Amino acid sequence: MIFSATAKKNRVCITTSINYSLWLMLAVFFVTASLPQPLRGAENVSLFSRLDFAPALLEMISIELKQKTGRQFSLIVRPVESANASAAGELNDYLLVEDGIARSSLPPEIESTGISIKLIWAMAVRNEVSHLFTKKIITLQDFGTILNELKKRFPDRFPWFEGLLSRNSARNFCLLLGEKKRHKYSRNLIMQPFWKQLHAAAILSRAIETEVLNPLSVEADLSLAMEVFEAGDAMFVSHWVPESVFSGSPEVWPGHKSGFLIPFPCLDGLARLPVLSLRLWKTSRASTVNNLNMNTVSDASLSSMIRLNYASETVWLEKNFAQFYDSLIVGDL
């Protein structure tokens, strides 16, 4: 079965739906139960980043670290505000820190290992629909044509799912599809296909209205979105993966046998990939870590990379996410 969520003929208010909320509560329970546990013999790493880390993403980062160092690490996500607490010996000997977090916010005695993990935000596509792709880089209109074709074949199912409750995903959509302007929408434009809308919130809202994007996306985080893709209940989901998935180690991504990755479709058909880096630091008492795997993907092969960091992105997350989400929910486009 390609994607099993049942479509509704009339759009409902997601935030007041008891059935949806109960479904999501159960999903969150099972996702929480599946969080990776510390591994025996593994060295703990304190992870500081603005990202909302799905269990599958944490597992991928751990595998990436093992490939680079030959050592097993167990990641512990901590609030960025507590990063300097390790100066008092409260944190681990190793820290994985997102680019852009001020050096002054970190313990003064730590030193760089020279090892970093690069994460790339891309769209996962299931193999069941690979025959609909003649190329890996497509326009938003091409994507709409594919979605409409799937909707014709399976009218009671949603082909596309996203974790729109994730602030980081919302930010990436706005980077790729544009942000809301101050002008008023005309009725004629609102009724056009989603790929003709003018900004991210309008595009996603219209995709929900035309029943190609699952309305549950509005209340889903990154963890749930990745679970939906792995279960085969959606053909398209966007999420973070380590750089190595693109540079010769696809097995790092759990979905590599059931799907493939493409840049999220943009209006102009150019490949743009949001990218951020996590850098490994260590205390003076920690043993030296060597980089055993120097393979990286070239910037040219990934077309235009949008480099993100904690400092620049935090401003948007704090000031603009609420407006984006309200526009998406209320329909104030």
Image: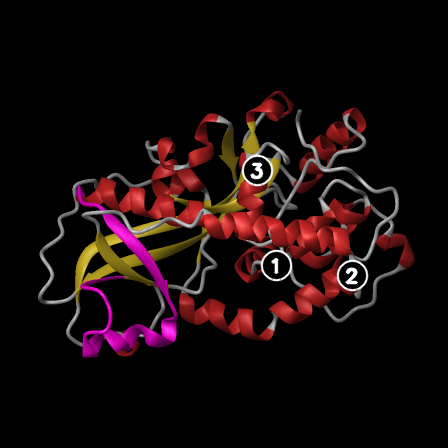
Q: Residues within 10 Å of mark 3 (few under 14, many from 20)?
A: many
Q: Position of residue 24 (x, y in %)?
A: 64, 52
Give the percent coordinates (x, y) of residue 20: 72, 51
Q: Could you tell me which quadrant the C terminus lies in?
A: bottom right
Indicate whether 319 appears above or below 175.
below
Which quarter of the picture shows residue 138?
Answer: top right
Which quarter of the rendered picture does the N terminus lie within?
Answer: top right
Residue at the image point whose x is 72% and y is 67% from the top: 326
Q: Which residue is mark 2?
A: 16
Q: Earlier in the sequence, mark 2 or mark 1?
A: 2
Q: Earlier in the sequence, mark 3 or mark 1?
A: 1
**What residue type is disc 3 on?**
Phe
Q: In the rendered view, does 332 fall on the left or right side of 163?
A: right
Is residue 298 visible to the viewer in this orientation of the structure?
no
Q: Tell me if 255 is positioned left or right of 76 in this view.
A: right
Question: Whole-Å distance between the Cαs marked 2 and 1?
Answer: 16 Å
| C-alpha distance separating marks 3 and 1 | 16 Å
The first of marks 3 and 2 along the sequence is: 2
Q: Which residue is mark 3?
A: 229
Nearest the viewer among 51 and 309 is 51
Residue placed at 13% from the left, 48% from the top? 290
State the image coordinates of residue 171 (x, y, percent, origin top left). Answer: 56, 60
- The magenta stretch is 70-95
Residue 88 lies, in percent from the top left, at: 20, 79
Q: Residues within 10 Å of mark 2 (few under 14, many from 20)?
A: few
Three-letter code for the amino acid on which mark 1 is drawn: Leu
